[in-house]
Image (cartoon, grey):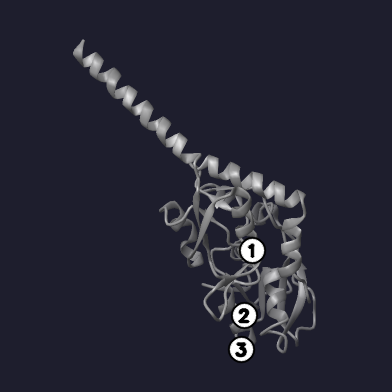
Amino acid sequence: MKSFVRFIAAAALTVAGATGVLAQAKEWKEIRIGTEGAYPPFNNLNAKKELEGYEIDYGNLLCERMKVKCTWVVQDWDGIIPALLANKYDVIIAGMNATDERKKQVDFTTPYNKTPIWMIGPKSTKSDDISPAALKGKSIGAQGSTIHANYLEKYYKDSTPRLYPTQEEANLDLINGRLDYIVADALALSDFLTGKGKDCCKFVAEVKRDDAIHGPGVGAAIRKSDTALKAMFDKAIAETTADGSNQKIQDKWLKFAK
């Protein structure tokens, strides 16, 4: 009988503990946001080592709407999901497309952005044919561990994919003639073509999206256990989309120029 009583007491403590955890999960007052800080115009560290870009402004707006204090954490892209799972921060806002592969590890909020995908090359590029047959033997750069790297792996087996830790490194190799093409989000490449790449490089063609690889759009990544946090972000994203404030920030930062 005493054993049974001890069992009931232990079970009661377990339930109480679980209830406490659930209650705590709903009391988000401070949120840590992980971002790369190397993917303009979405997120970038400027000359003063300050974060800026569309996602920085939009993330701060979401925090205002949720009435929480937010802190930004800069993390290299290759380790951005592992660091979330290791509790280094609570959410990722870093131009991350909500792909099925990533959903095996994390949950995603409602998408807050969806941009075209471009392929660019040197100004000497004569054809806009970017079919795998046309680019056989050509070197194509992309940032590693991205949907663009996965796209090259699937479709351009007869080309030479070259993967980089950051988009900036791929851009520099195109400037210096070490790449024939780059594939990336149109906004990131547009920012490059109107900046450091304006004298060397040009838009070649838009890439046809493969939903199995590219996903439905860019969302915030959250641990699967943090369902209350996801609900908070989904609500704030819906509100800022409906009232036009998301679009207003996009208009400030996300400008296409071929």
Measure how far apart labels 3 and 1 are at the Cα level. Answer: 33 Å
What amino acid type should be assigned to the residue bearing mark 3?
Asn
Q: What amino acid type is highlighted by mark number 1?
A: Asp
Residue 103, compared with residue 39, is above or below; it is above
**Mark 2 or mark 1, whichever is nearer to me:** 1
- Comes first in the chain, label 2 or label 3: 2
Mark drawn on residue 171: 2
Give above or below for 253 relative to 171.
above
Label 1 SS: helix
User: Image height check: is 165 above or below 209?
Assistant: below
Who's the residue at 40% across and 31% down the image?
Answer: 18
- In this view, the residue in front, 106 or 125, is 106
Viewed as shown, does residue 44 lie left or right of 116? left
What x and y, as percent, mark residue 246? 72, 57
Q: Name the residue under label 1.
A: 57
Q: Residue 142: percent from the left, percent from the top?
A: 60, 71
Circle 2 sits in a helix, a strand or a loop, which is it? helix
